[in-house]
Image (cartoon, rainbow, N blue to C red):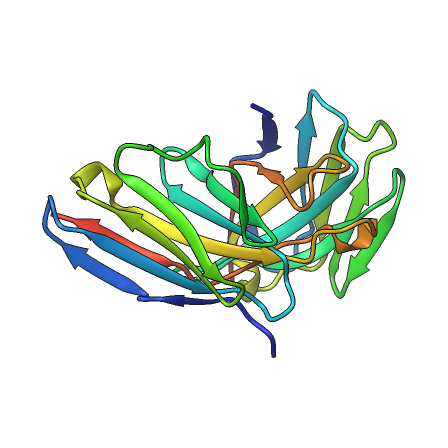
Amino acid sequence: DARVTQTPRHKVTEMGQEVTMRCQPILGHNTVFWYRQTMMQGLELLAYFRNRAPLDDSGMPKDRFSAEMPDATLATLKIQPSEPRDSAVYFCASGLGGEAPTNEKLFFGSGTQLSVL
Amino acid sequence: GQQLNQSPQSMFIQEGEDVSMNCTSSSIFNTWLWYKQDPGEGPVLLIALYKAGELTSNGRLTAQFGITRKDSFLNISASIPSDVGIYFCAGSRLLNFNKFYFGSGTKLNVKP
């Protein structure tokens, strides 16, 4: 089964430390999204890429968060320095964006549960 | 940004009962998706809708794309305990290439 793979599944770190989350999108998918999920805010879009180019990262705190796609099989989300308020579940999702309307769908990974102490 | 109003926020039902939930938006969407999320997992796509008025089923689940294109509905028939979870709607506007706005979720509890 093709699936979006995220690592690590869980991360506990101390305030001020750098956190890197990784995502392997489904092979062939050309859009990749990072979402953050909290009880209070639900699913928030942080950033997304199309054909590896960043299209929108307006949902991301720029001073500490960065998102990149070094190649088509890897997307990363970094937080430096991390803060307790960053504690959440971070999801990566991928899709096959294009002209065909029926390509409009997203597939999610299992998430990285981040706890910043 | 776009807002999707999903209701109800939570439901407590008896096994065997039917369930209905809906999502509304102030904007027109061209795609509606419905997801289910189990604890500790990512949302799993249940149904995708692409045309106004479209009615699509997936087993005991049926979803409809509202004719105004501003709403969508999900029905679950004859609920079972494994239906427990959080159900999310998501909407996308044309030419946004998979950029979806998500509802806040409906938490479903099923009593055996």
x, y percentage for residue A45? 48, 39
Residue B16 falls left or right of residue A99: left
Task: Please give the name of the residue rendered at 75% of the width and 32% of the height, measured from the top-left corner.
Answer: B71
| Residue A53 appears in the picture as rendered | yes
Decide which of A102, B81 is in the foreground and name it: A102
x, y percentage for residue A62? 33, 33
Residue B112 falls left or right of residue B20: left
**Quarter location, residue A61:** top left
- Furthest toward the bottom, the residue is A1
Specify the quadrant that holds the N terminus of chain B. top right
x, y percentage for residue A93? 53, 55
Task: Please give the name of the residue rendered at 55% of the width and 47% of the height, measured from the top-left corner.
Answer: A53
Task: Please give the name of the residue rendered at 36% of the width and 39% of the height, measured from the top-left corner.
Answer: A39
Task: Please give the name of the residue rendered at 58% of the width and 57% of the height, measured from the top-left corner.
Answer: A94
Decide which of B31, B62 is in the foreground and name it: B31
x, y percentage for residue B90? 63, 41
Residue B91 falls left or right of residue B86: right
Marker count (numbered): 0
Residue B40 falls left or right of residue B81: left
- Furthest toward the top, the residue is B26
**Quarter location, residue A66:** top left
| Residue B62 appears in the picture as rendered | no
